[in-house]
Image: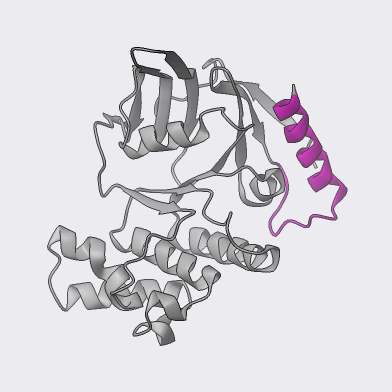
Amino acid sequence: MAGLSDSPGDGSNLDRNSKVVVDGVSKVYESERQRVEALSDVNFSVSDGEFVCLVGPSGCGKTTLFRTIAGLEVPTGGEIRLDGEPVTGPGTDRGMVFQEYGLFPWRTVRDNVAFGLEEQGVKEPERSRRVGEMLDLVGLGEFADAYPKELSGGMKQRVGIARALAVDPEILLADEPFGSVDAQTRDMLHEELLRIWAETGKTVLFVTHDVEEAVKLSDRVVVMAADPGRVREVVTVDIDRPRDRTDPAFGEYVDRVRSLIGE
């Protein structure tokens, strides 16, 4: 291993020409009774084709930041840019996967994956071709006519990934997508996601509370601190893939990230 590589979270290393740029973002929630500063001067960037994980303690604003990048929340200050353009709301340039599967129970696997394409007005047979490609990509081609109730948790999450990728987004955003599955299924999904990432070349921003998951998956780990939410450090994971949890270098990175979270 080349050594643990950290960079500060103050924006000094922010690459404003990157695929995704989070530039001085803050988020404040105000009501008559209280004012909550969820995010304060958050700075980091994600390069084209990079896999970046966000980790941090509870209450550090990981999900708020995710929702802001997704365009579901508006920052109070600062700006988020995708390919140089400000993010002003949701868009098909960002595919989203959540911990809750969010599948329509009355739709088959095929029809769930097709939903975004239908919303875009994509016609047959292009829609069917694209859905077929995505189902093959996630290994669910033979389950195209199944309903969500007939699927395991891991299979449901693979449908969610296929649905997010079907619209060919610029970036895949995932908010703790594997948090509700068992450890064995989670390991399988890790391998599946890394394979899909390698095959598609998509940019991935992945939120997790699991430090080992972050070290296993990502090129870099953005470690956040709480009260208010901000970037403490960005850790570059310099280990060849596939990564082995028993590798001493892997353990060093896990210990380093955990120590940053605990500071």
Residue range in magenta is 238-262
Residue occupying the point 30% across, 27% down: 74
Does 203 appear above or below 76?
below
Does 197 appear above or below 23?
below
Residue occupying the point 48% across, 21% down: 42
Residue occupying the point 16% across, 58% down: 120
Locate residue 211: give its quadrant. top right
Question: How many marks can you see?
Answer: 0
Residue occupying the point 85% across, 55% down: 246
- The N terminus: image quadrant: top right
The picture places residue 138, in percent across and down from the top left corner, at 46, 72
Locate residue 36: give its quadrant. top left
- Whether 259 is among the magenta residues is yes
Q: Is residue 209 left or right of residue 121?
A: right
Q: Is residue 247 left or right of residue 227?
A: right
- The C terminus: image quadrant: top right
Task: Using the rendered image of the protein, determine whether residue 226 is visible from the camera's viewpoint.
Answer: yes
Front residue of this view, candidates 204 and 70: 70
The picture places residue 67, in percent across and down from the top left corner, at 39, 37
- Whether 93 is among the magenta residues is no
Does 87 appear above or below 33?
below
- Main SS class of the magenta portion in the image: helix
Locate residue 84: give its quadrant. top left
The picture places residue 80, in percent across and down from the top left corner, at 35, 27
The picture places residue 225, in percent across and down from the top left corner, at 62, 23
Give the colour scheme shown. one colour
Front residue of this view, candidates 8 and 42: 42
